[in-house]
Image: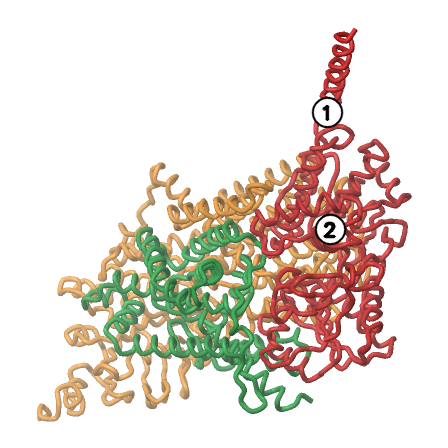
Amino acid sequence: MPSLTLLGQALVSGLLAGGIYGLLALGLSLSWGLLRLVNLAHFALALLGAYLTYQLGTAYHLSPWLAAAAIVPLFFLLGLGLHAVFTYFRVTEFTSLLVTFGLTVILESLIQWFWTADYRRYETPYATASARVGPLFIPALELLACLTAAVLSLATWAWLRFTYVGKALRASAEDPAMAAAFGVNHRVQGFLLSGVSATYAGIAGAFIALISTLAPSQIWAWVGVVFAVVIIGGLANPVGALLAGLLIGVSESVTMAVVTPAWAPLVAFSVLILILVARPERV
Amino acid sequence: MISLQRLGCRGVVAALVLLGFVTTVAAAPSGPPVRIGSTLALTGPLAPTALLHKIAGEIYVEELNKANGLLGRPVEWVLLDDQSKPDVARSLYEKLITVDKVDLLMGPYATSAILAAMGVAQRYQKMLPHHTFGMPHLAKYEMHFPTAAFGPEPQRTLPTTVFDALAATSKPPRSVAIVTSKFPSAQHQSSGAKEVAEKRGLKVPLYLEYEFGTRDFGAIAARIKDASADVLWIGALGLDGNQILEALKKLDYTPPRHFHLFPAPGPLAVAPYGKLALSSTVFEEHPPFLGNPGAARLVPLFRERAARANVPYPHVDTQAGGSFAAWQLLEAAVTATKSLDDKVLGQWLRKNRVPTLIGTLRFDGPNNYGDDLFKVKQVQDGKWVVVWPREFAAPGARLLPP
Amino acid sequence: MSPAGRRVAAALAAAGIGLGALAAAGLPAFYESFLYLIFSWIALATSWAIFSGYAGYFSFGHGAFFGAGMYTTATLTTALDVPFLPTLLAAGGLAALLGAGVGAVVFRVKRLRGELFALLTLAVTFVLATIVLNTRIDGGPGVYLSAVPMPGLLASPTGTLYLLGLGLALATVGAAYAVAHSRLGLGLFAIHDDEDVAEVEGVPTFRYKLAAFALSAGIAGVAGGIHAMYVSYVTVGETFSITVPLYVVLMSVLGGARHWLGPAVGATLIGASLFAFTGGQQAILGRAVVALALILVILLLPEGVVPAALRRWRAWRPAAREAPASATPALVSDRQPGREAAALECHDVWKAFGGIQALRGVSLQVAPGEIVGLVGPNGSGKTTLINVASGHYAADRGRIALGAVTLAGRPAHAIAGLGVSRTYQIPRPFAHFTALENVALAATFGAARCSPPQARAEARRWLEFTGLGRRATALPHELNLHERKFLELARALAGRPRVILLDEVLSGLNPAEVAGAIRLIRQIHAGGVAILFVEHLMRAVLELAHRVVVLNEGEVIAEGRPHEAMRAPRVVEVYLGRTHVA
């Protein structure tokens, strides 16, 4: 029978890991829900952000925070560019999967071309720092990532809920023709959202660089679980994405604490299946 | 008189120069190339390590061509990308044999791809030397030749070596926590470690298997810390070991001793928490290994080439060492038998011992496995040094206590 | 089989013989294995599209069925020494069972469509993978099939696999063609466009989805079983990776997911491109080039390669002229014996949506040959009553019957089959079907249950009847509102109903169109159909209805002949306010 401390530590660990899932899921949830485009390249962008953080940190000795600050505008522009391609070719939800898959492979190849396939680790002094709360340890970097996820989620929620731009976006997503009749400039809103979504990918990437080791094929490691998080949380639901991430993170972690860790995905996804089948309205 | 002598001297010198020139020209390989075909995971999740094998192979083939080639003919390496997929590997080996019609084969990277290639080699009765196979009991083809010299029962011999090394220190461990990925070869050898440990009277307070691809090790780290064993055996592949150590550090826990099964060597050696990590190897860049055949020549070449390719850890160890050894096998067999016939080569290899970079290899044991050549190495001052058995330890090095 | 079907079957057979002979003649093994991989992908992508492409339920779980098949063969051959070929039957059967099981649970829940369905199928894959990894089926070390004897269909093992793969690919493409041209396929396509309407038009959606999903899963299982012998070393990591579920989607979208040949074309293109750049030196950039090519193709041909090609070809060929239809068909009278006209009866029907009580004990009847007007202010429950009567929603309480047969509690498609049709206030035609096909669907699945050629003839007649004869080949988005409303009407009529429920058919029409519609409704009534129509346009109600029922806030507040009912004080109060009651 695992001790309370062990369970508590697993809970903490799961929450923090879930925060990263939420952070990654945030941008994807927004673009899928509000632009009706499935952007697989979100993961490639995140990893690109990670590699850039690594490069700026190791080759130019920029602190991660400065690196992230430099990445944000760059990724905003990348998001704009991506959306330009989508609108020019009138890409639909259906075909966006294929287009972004191609983009992901291209980005993965570029990353491998510049940084080789070998592992890269961005060593920083904060990598193993932890805060201590009673018998529990709270790793600093993961905590920061989780807090960032929470702040961005809430900020996005508020933005969508209370600002004109946010409401315009939601209206356009529901009924573009009607929204346009009311003067909503769908095009501009779409670009804005794509830029924001890409920035979130970049920020998630910065944290990934700090927390894990990088290899080009890492892009694919996150796809399954983050898609699950996005859908459970509800498309275009920023707070939902965060909560869903936490849910999956905790269920995986607690399982690993109690039984053979290899069973973890079973528990997380069985819980998910049960929720979906028994009470789909909750989702 | 004097002029004749001078003419004679100059003539002798001229004749010598001419002779030297002629022999050099005659020594460069000529004629139709000997084509050696293989695949590697140049893209996909296995690419990080396959890159090392690509570099090793390229260096070896270049060196061959700078000397006499194989049987006086130049060597051409036909290398294809199996994208880390065994089904693609199978198909590409069939292409190499039936379409490209290569003369000889070299194995791909990692167990699954090697098994796929082995099936093809078996059907066409071609010899298959390979360097990274982790499950000896599955290799049933009589013409396969492994340089991942685990011996036929790595799940027994490797843990025995490791525990022997630990037992010879001033404070032998009394308990071992075992955490392993469910990657087939890692799990196989780690479950063996559990049996060996229990037979030796060591307590195993924790035995955990995690899924290959686990992202968050927080809970596992908490259980390791709870178990509080003297040694932590990590059946890790690639970077799992790093992640586990980091997760433990965040819990303010450093395992007294930790052994990693198949780590990515570079990241572990340079990581701050990698101090005194243990692992196993068949080659490291220090004596007595540097005295092995080919080492003095190949090691500096690899270092230079790998650094140019931006590889963060440009040193020869088990991966590159095993790769070089596999090429050495090929060369030795071909040179000795003066033949490119797979059957002839295979028979020769089974009957003879071949001295290579990693030691002397023999293939007359079960499933063509011979001796277990794995030694224990440790990270000391940011570098890997062999510490056990004592005859192979780096000069003056020994297994340092925590 | 239709002539087109015979042509396709012949083409497939020819391809099979040709490609098979190629292998027997001694193709180098590489081409056999390369083509085997293509065949395998063709089978996987096509089987995925049979359900997900046709019905629009994007499944991300194809990997689960593929993996189930792989491990079935792996386990049976190694642990139980079953010969290889019989295990393929087991592999397909088990996978089909798994698909049916998942479907049986999931398809009952209305909300689990779209991305929720995608997620659920993905979750099933993870669950299955974990179970296989942690139990004796695999447990971690993988399953090695090298000792399993290969059946000697051809001289070499690769040749045998090639033949098996070829056979499976051809069978799958043939199955896709057969499904696409069957009632099952028609139903699936309708489900794709609007599942609820399909159900109401008579398509047994649950059964069809289940059948298609099980078929799709079973084929994937067989493909997996064959693949187990191909790789000969089966591990969880390789089998349940994201490759299969992702690539089948990409291949189908590239080739055209709604066309029976689309996924095969997509699979060939993408499968071949995997080998395009395997040369050592260009491996990395080669992948990028292939990806770029893929992007360009889909950007330029968004509907898929095969539909785009067909569109070009059709534009080049002149279209065939359809013969005009005959005179107005009779409705109830000239039909199958034993289907007498019956009265629609609703007795004490209650329906609530969350906190809103939409119907409070509503009772009304529509006798055979009657036209009943259902009126009331907005929100009084009129559309809800129609929804409940047609089976779109289930009533909470109360009895709804057609003659002696109870309707309440039956699925909507059964109700349609018994002879109840309805139109929608905002027309809901199937977007990808032409006007003709929309109506033909109702003729196929409604009470009339026509065969395909009969259905087309019926459809043409009804389109003529409603004045849409010249718009038969138009797609719904090309029709204006008036035309779409009449399309609704034609569709409702093609089901040969005994009772027709019209929901505000006249709203949005100009006066000339209204007059035309009223004439049409009279003609329908003359054909022997009872009509319950919801209308706000009082002039139409007063002209057409024999009786009027007035609803307010879910209750019947008046009933009777139009002029009398509309003058009842309560009705005036409800419509115009208390001050006008006098």
The quadrant in which residue B96 appears is: top right
Residue B177 percent across, percent down from the top left: 74, 77
Q: Colour of chain B?
A: red
At a point 78% along the width and 48% down the height, the residue shown is B357
> What label does residue C95 carry, if any?
none
Percent from the top left, x then y, of residue A16?
A: 51, 78
| Mark 1 or mark 2: whose residue is earlier in sequence | 1
Q: Nearer the viewer, residue A134 or C168?
A: A134
Q: In the rendering, which numbered label is found on residue B321?
A: 2
Report the chain shown in green: A
User: For the residue labelled by badge 2, is the local secondary structure a helix, a strand or a loop?
Assistant: helix
The image shows residue C90, relative to residue B166, as above or below, that is above
Task: Evaluate whether residue B275 shows in this view.
Answer: yes
Label 1 resides on the chain identified as B
Q: Colour of chain C?
A: orange
**Where residue A172 appears, x then y in whole percent?**
28, 67
Q: Mark 1 Cα within 10 Å, few/some/many (few <14, many 20+)?
A: few
Q: Quadrant of the C terminus of chain C?
A: bottom left
Left or right: B282 as drawn, with respect to B350 = left
Q: Residue at x 77, y 69 (%)?
A: B399
Q: Residues within 10 Å of mark 2 (few under 14, many from 20)?
A: many
Residue B14 location, quadrant: top right
Dot 1: element: helix
User: Which amino acid, by three-letter code, is at mark 2?
Assistant: Gly
Same-chain check, marks 1 and 2? yes
Residue A107 sits above or below residue A53 on the image: above
Which numbered mark, 1 or 2, is in the foreground of this view? 1
> Where is mark 1, residue-wise?
B24
Q: Quadrant of residue C218?
A: bottom right
Q: Nearer the viewer, residue B215 or B229?
A: B229
